[in-house]
Image (spheres, rainbow, N blue to C red):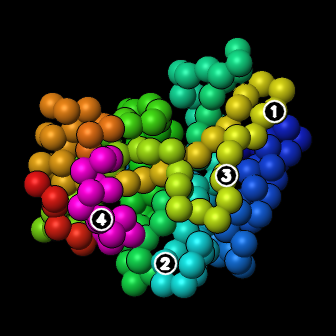
């Protein structure tokens, strides 16, 4: 499909923002969906925001309709995340979230849970689901990008266990976040143990 000038301009704005915030040389990969009907770019940045972890962002999810608005404009998102650099499947995790969005199976808004994404890659660990949260832990904020027709922002992948998900359903996301802070979890470790 041919890219319009507007598409290229928006892609450049998203890419520039990622480059500015991640601060290190970027690596690019392309992932195709299982049915080969869609593809997505994943940006990878080792040792960002600090040594030993890798920051990731999708590039192109913003083109998907999200059924949310901001200032009377369409609100679109990119996914991002940070994990231990020894992990070799986090980029796949991002692509799976992106394809779920692209195919219209889910929307993306803060504190939405994408269920049973992690077992696709690692069936035998405590972490099972992805909780989407506003990004944190970066040296500077990815923020938002406003264009004529849309507002683009980022949501961060935060892995949670089945028990943590159940706790959140009962007590709300803020209580879960508070519990994470109290337990001092390693948010970059996808192999961490569930706190409940």
Label 2 or label 4, whichever lies nearer to me, is 4
69, above or below 166, in the image: above
- Could you tell me how far apart the alpha carbons at marks 1 and 4 are, in whole angstroms? 38 Å
Spatial CA distance of label 2 from label 1 is 32 Å
179 in the magenta segment: yes
Q: What stretch is highlighted in magenta?
A: 177-190
Between 38 and 66, the residue placed more toward the observer is 66
Q: Distance between the residues labelled 4 and 3?
A: 24 Å
Q: Name the residue tied to disc 2.
A: 53
Which residue is drawn at the image coordinates 63% and 41% (left, top)?
153
- Residue 184, label in figure: 4
Q: How crowded is mark 2: few (under 14 residues within 10 Å), some or many (20 or more)?
A: some
- What is the x, y in percent for residue 77? 59, 40
Q: Could you tell me if the residues under marks 2 and 1 are in contact, i.e. CB atoms within 8 Å?
A: no
Q: Earlier in the sequence, mark 2 or mark 1?
A: 2
For the residues labelled 2 and 4, the Cα–Cα distance comes to: 17 Å
Work out whether residue 157 can be spotted: yes
Q: Residue 29 carries which label?
A: none
Name the residue beneath numbered marker 3: 142
Identify the residue at image location x=12%, y=49%. Answer: 163
The picture places residue 88, in percent across and down from the top left corner, at 40, 78
Marks 2 and 1: which is nearer the front?
2
Element under label 4? loop
Which mark, by number, is residue 147?
A: 1
Q: Nearer the viewer, residue 110 or 75?
A: 110
Q: Is residue 8 left or right of residue 164?
A: right
Residue at screen point 59% across, 72% down: 49
Where the C terminus falls, by quadrant? bottom left
């Amino acid at each position: 499909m041919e890219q319009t000038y507007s598409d290229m301009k928006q892609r450049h704005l998203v890419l520039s923002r990622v480059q500015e915030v991640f601060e290190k040389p970027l690596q690019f990969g392309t992932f195709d969906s299982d049915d080969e009907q869609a593809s997505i770019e994943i940006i990878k940045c080792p040792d960002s925001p600090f040594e030993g972890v890798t920051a990731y962002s999708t590039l192109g999810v913003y083109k998907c309709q999200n059924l949310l608005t901001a200032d009377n404009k369409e609100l679109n998102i990119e996914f991002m995340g940070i994990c231990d650099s020894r992990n070799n499947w986090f980029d796949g995790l991002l692509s799976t979230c992106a394809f779920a969005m692209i195919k219209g199976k889910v929307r993306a808004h803060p504190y939405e849970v994408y269920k049973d994404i992690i077992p696709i890659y690692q069936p035998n660990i405590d972490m099972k689901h992805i909780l989407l949260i506003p990004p944190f832990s970066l040296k500077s904020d990815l923020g938002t990008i406003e264009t004529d027709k849309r507002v683009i922002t980022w949501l961060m992948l935060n892995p949670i266990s089945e028990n943590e998900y159940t706790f959140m359903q009962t007590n709300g996301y803020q209580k879960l976040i508070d519990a994470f802070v109290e337990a001092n979890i390693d948010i970059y470790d996808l192999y961490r143990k569930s706190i409940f």
